[in-house]
Image (spheres, helix red, strand yellow):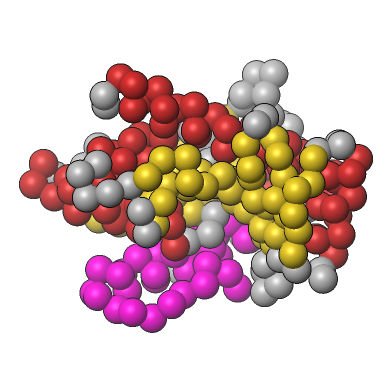
Amino acid sequence: MNETYKKIEEFLAKEKIRLMEQDELSFTVRFQMHRIVIHVNQEDPNFVAVVLSGFAEVNEENAADATYRCYQICRQMKVAKAYHVNSMLLASYEFYYLDTEDLAFQLKKGLGAVISVLVAYRKMERQGS
Amino acid sequence: MNKEVLLEQMHALGFELQELPGMGYGFHYDDTHYVLFWDEEGEESDSVSIAIPNIFEVNPDNRTEVLELVNNIGARLKYIKAVAMNEGMWLFYEYYLNTEENLEELIEHMVRVLQMSLYFFYQQLEGGTEEVESEE
């Protein structure tokens, strides 16, 4: 268990964010009615990824549209990105934190950002773009 | 945070910045051209972005290939996203700034990760299968 893991655990407790599951390298939290996973990485101790996955399925029929929507989101939103892997759509906010205060700041940004990606993706879906 | 603080840090790290009117600041490192962007977000936090421009030509005939490359880069590289601008694809590392502390560490990290990502990108183009971690 690395230092980052402990700091995230403290952040979640302090902010009273509902922790659903945790294992050695991730925390699954309930945030704004979504399951979001916060990943740490043992080889890259200051790396954290906040990931919201599976909010849309990508198949042969819609793959080109999904790729285009992800691209538009990457263009329009700062730091946050959207992409698909193995038929699953993901929104992520990946960062390198500088100190404990920065970690809390980035985590808050990240949790909000992945929800914004989901909202933007759904809006494009509705608009047929 | 004041933009001047960032520029001072860049200078202290030995990067020679060239102002690119209406865009940002250009600099060279290890035979690669980078562009530094600074955005003041008003009530929001300021952000800094460093990019490697024009790593791949974008034209009407290769749109599908470009979008797939962008998706692949987003999925496989930590911290990095690819964006098509005008007639070229750029690699971006974007960051919301919360502190003036450790800026030097952040800038070095951004440049190193971009450098690794460029290497990864060319490996992908050549059909290489070698995994490259976007980290030191």
Q: Residue furthest left?
A: B61
Where residue A69 appears, x then y in whole percent? Answer: 33, 36
- Picture quarter with the N terminus of chain B: top right
**Membership of A124 in magenta stretch:** no
Q: Which residues are magenta?
A: B107-136
Q: Main secondary structure of the magenta part?
A: helix
Where residue B27 appears, x then y in whole percent? Answer: 47, 52
In the foreground, B3 or A110? A110
In the foreground, A114 or A80? A114
**Membership of B121 in magenta stretch:** yes
On screen, residue B81 versus residue A23, left or right, reads left
In the foreground, A5 or B84? A5
Where residue A84 appears, x then y in whole percent? Answer: 39, 51
Q: Residue at x 39, y 64 (%)?
A: B118
In the image, residue B92 sits, relative to residue A85, either above or below, namely above
Visible residue check, residue A45: no
The image quadrant that residue B43 belongs to is top right
On screen, residue B98 versus residue B91, left or right, reads right
Q: Residue at x 37, y 40 (%)?
A: A70
Visible residue check, residue B123: yes
> Could you tell me how many numbered marks the image carries?
0
In the image, residue B30 sits, relative to residue A83, either above or below, namely below
The image quadrant that residue B120 belongs to is bottom left
